[in-house]
């Protein structure tokens, strides 16, 4: 979530006795797993859609613990499978529908320190810093919060707007038993008390993943070993979730304390996993780029020699195969009015925006402080424009560093993966969101709760629900993201699809045989003057007997390209269905709109295709309008007693839940 920045703003009370830590002891050894089956009982060569969450925090993450969350990775996996778990505030929660797969991604940063400070009897447990972290004693000076106790700041930080501009922190000398004047590296002070603790926690995370991974032929639930690399320089959010293919992993996670630049993370993953010769495989997923002040997809190597530029772009493309387009802190698809974006406004780019509409534009530069509500917003904070920037880089150096499939997840800090239903949102950040009144607050916090949302889900088209099949699909980018709904979208691209393909029973087989699925490059056309043809389909979220889901409104194709002057261009095309009026929803009851379709399909040919110009295409599927979670919870209060968020002009009562497919790319021959 916010890492050390949150606590340093004084959001956590000092001098309050924290509940007794309940980090689970190492569980008993898991029973020997069966050999991985050649295929699951349920296996479809034309692939099925599986839903998961690859962005989950538990009490083993430093910020979740300070929010009084005590659920462990074991609890998170139990929740994902459909079991009830306890939440902060004497509550419990349970998914309406289990997930197919999940990965706990606790913060790599300070994971050893958190364990030392919350495990009674550890060598550091009684240090003042650990007592501050647990909330048992106050901090010195009043400006440092509980999480800052985990590191030593040797120099007074700069402050902007009352927020610390965080550089690379140092490890706490007392907790880790290191020289505070030595900058930590993976080969240096990390190999100390905190390094040993980090390795131990990572092993326990792995035990949890293995225990809940169904390796039988039933393939009912799949887990992945994973962590979050949480780089937050100067409160710009440049985080990655690191997902491993199997149980072969490095001995400990790489944090931004160890590698303070993304390039260092990619090189570490190449060295310790991809090129280690051990069978290790990995993808890193940039997430929540809307709070990066233009730094998530900044091309920062243009002053390097050309060979170095190409090498960096190739390494990034090798490691980063997907991008998170949606999570609790908002949508990162697009934003209207951004500098240098042609093609007109897209009305649907106003969906779940976290930054205020009047936030300054970074234009060609970058900024700082987005996580604290300050600093500029950049077009490169958004996935659509990062995809176009990738086209521009491919033209310039021959490599596209931003060839990214699309996914979404929650970023829950309640250990509640997949809890994305608007009608039963319980909050995502522990003690501060335990009641509806707290969740509906719109001020007094650097992350206003009412502007958060339940988050999204990743969808994967794979032959079966096994690690191998799911991870292979993620690497080939045959994925989609949703805003929490379980819509199933599909996109194929080719040159010879028949116009009546939607009415034929062999649509999917033809889609694969005569073209490519989402996540791939269009094949060569083979004939002069041809334009690419796309086939987009979507099946509505079926809901359950007790969970009403929305019908489908329309399918759109979004196209991006670079013009002759290097400018970014976009166009949006409605290809199936049509807009449904907001008035179809009764705001006094929030009953689902009766309008819309069960499924949609269209065959679409690009009318403005230029064979000499690179382009990127993805599908966006919209549900009929429905009430946002906040509108539903505001109805529980009498009008005169409704919390401030119920009147927040930045929070609209109606939304259109949606799904985004991974793109299909076109490149001119030669």
Image: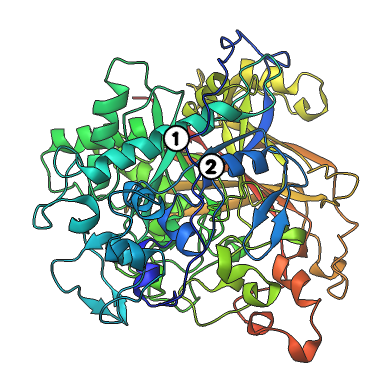
The residue lying furthest to the bottom in this view is 640
Q: Are marks 2 and 1 in contact (CB under 8 Å)?
A: yes
351 vs 551: above or below: below
Q: In the image shown, does 511 or 137 lie closer to the viewer?
A: 137
Give the residue at the far front of this rendering.
Answer: 121
Decide which of tag 2 and tag 1 comes sooner along the chain: 2
Q: Which mark is residue 73?
A: 2
**Going by the image, does 249 lie left or right of 595?**
left
Number of residues whose C-alpha sits closer than 10 Å to that of mark 2, classed few (under 14), some (14–19) or many (20 or more): many
Q: Position of residue 498 (x, y in %)?
A: 72, 24
Q: Which of 446 and 333 is in front in this view?
A: 446
Taking the spot 70% from the left edge, 17% from the top edge, the residue there is 509
- Residue 197 visible in the shown view: yes
Residue at (57%, 15%) from the top-left corner?
Answer: 33
Q: In which quarter of the image is the C terminus?
A: top left
Residue 315 location in percent, x, y? 27, 32
Residue 342 visible from this viewpoint:
no
The residue where tag 1 is placed is 204
Q: Is mark 1 on a helix, strand or loop?
A: helix
- Between residues 233 and 670, which one lies in front from this camera angle? 233
Calculate the distance from the C-alpha at mark 2 to the C-alpha at mark 1.
9 Å
Residue at position x 10%, y 53% in the image: 179
In this picture, is 203 found above or below 561? above
Q: In the drawing, does residue 22 fall left or right of residue 645?
A: left
Across and down, in percent, residue 418 comes to: 65, 47
The picture quadrant where one finds residue 377 is bottom left
Q: What residue sits 50% from the left and 82% below the top?
A: 444
Q: Identify the secondary structure beneath mark 2.
A: helix
User: Taking 182 as reference, is 227 above or below it?
Assistant: above
Q: Residues within 10 Å of mark 1 (few under 14, many from 20)?
A: some
Q: Residue 6: x percent and y percent?
A: 40, 69
């Amino acid at each position: 979530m916010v890492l050390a920045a949150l606590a340093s703003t004084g959001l956590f009370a000092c001098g309050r006795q924290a509940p007794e830590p309940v980090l689970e002891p190492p569980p008993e050894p898991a029973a020997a797993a069966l050999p991985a089956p050649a295929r699951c009982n349920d296996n479809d060569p034309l692939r099925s859609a599986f839903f998961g969450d690859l962005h989950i925090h538990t009490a083993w993450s430093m910020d979740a613990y300070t929010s009084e969350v005590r659920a462990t990775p074991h609890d998170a996996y139990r929740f994902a499978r459909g079991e009830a778990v306890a939440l902060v505030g004497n509550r419990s929660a349970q998914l309406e529908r289990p997930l197919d797969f999940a990965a706990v991604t606790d913060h790599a940063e300070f994971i050893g320190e958190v364990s030392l400070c919350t495990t009674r009897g550890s060598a550091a447990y009684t240090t003042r810093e650990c007592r501050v972290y647990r909330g048992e004693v106050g901090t010195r000076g009043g400006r440092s919060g509980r999480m800052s106790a985990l590191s030593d700041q040797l120099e007074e930080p700069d402050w902007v707007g009352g927020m610390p501009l965080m550089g690379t922190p140092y490890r706490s000398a007392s907790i880790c038993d290191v020289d505070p004047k030595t900058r930590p590296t993976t080969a240096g002070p990390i190999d100390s008390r905190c390094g040993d603790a980090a390795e131990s926690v990572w092993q326990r995370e792995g035990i949890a993943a293995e225990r809940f991974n169904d390796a039988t032929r039933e393939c009912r639930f799949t887990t992945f070993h994973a962590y979050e690399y949480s780089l937050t320089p100067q409160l710009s959010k440049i985080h990655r979730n690191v997902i491993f293919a199997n149980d072969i992993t490095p001995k400990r996670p790489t944090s931004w304390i160890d590698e303070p630049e993304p390039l260092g993370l990619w090189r570490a993953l190449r060295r310790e996993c991809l090129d280690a010769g051990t069978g290790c495989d990995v993808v890193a997923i940039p997430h929540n780029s809307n709070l990066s002040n233009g730094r998530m997809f900044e091309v920062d190597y243009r002053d390097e020699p050309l060979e170095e530029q190409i090498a960096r772009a190739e390494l990034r493309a090798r490691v980063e195969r997907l991008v998170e387009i949606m999570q609790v802190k908002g949508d990162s698809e697009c934003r209207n009015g951004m500098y240098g974006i042609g093609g007109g406004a897209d009305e649907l780019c106003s969906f779940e925006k976290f930054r205020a509409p009047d936030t300054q534009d970074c234009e060609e530069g970058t900024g700082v402080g987005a996580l604290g509500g300050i600093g500029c917003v950049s077009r490169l904070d958004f996935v659509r424009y990062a995809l176009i920037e990738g086209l521009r880089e491919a033209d310039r150096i021959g490599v596209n560093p931003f060839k990214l499939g699309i996914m979404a997840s929650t970023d829950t800090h309640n250990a509640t993966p997949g809890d994305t239903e608007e009608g039963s949102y319980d909050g995502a950040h522990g003690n501060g969101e335990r009641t509806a009144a707290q969740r509906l607050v719109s001020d007094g916090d650097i992350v206003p709760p009412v502007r958060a949302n339940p988050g999204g889900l990743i969808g994967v088209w794979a032959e079966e629900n096994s690690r191998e099949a799911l991870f292979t699909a993620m690497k080939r980018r045959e994925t989609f993201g949703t805003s929490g709904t379980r819509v199933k979208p599909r996109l194929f691209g080719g040159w010879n699809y028949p116009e009546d393909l939607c009415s034929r029973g062999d649509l999917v087989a033809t889609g694969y045989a005569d073209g490519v699925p989402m996540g791939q490059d269009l094949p060569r056309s083979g004939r002069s003057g041809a334009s690419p043809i796309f086939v987009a389909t979507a099946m509505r979220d079926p809901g359950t007997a007790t969970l009403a889901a929305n019908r489908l409104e329309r399918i759109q194709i979004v196209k991006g390209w670079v013009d002759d002057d290097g400018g970014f261009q976009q166009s949006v095309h409605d290809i199936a269905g049509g807009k449904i009026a907001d008035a179809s929803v009764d705001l006094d009851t929030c009953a689902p709109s009766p309008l819309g379709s069960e499924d949609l399909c269209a065959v679409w040919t690009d009318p403005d295709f230029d064979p000499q110009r690179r382009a990127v295409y993805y599908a966006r599927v919209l549900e009929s309008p429905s009430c946002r979670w906040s509108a539903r919870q505001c109805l529980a209060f009498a009008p005169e007693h409704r919390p401030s968020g119920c009147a927040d002009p930045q929070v609209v009562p109606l939304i259109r839940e949606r799904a985004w497919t991974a793109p299909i790319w076109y490149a001119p021959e030669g």
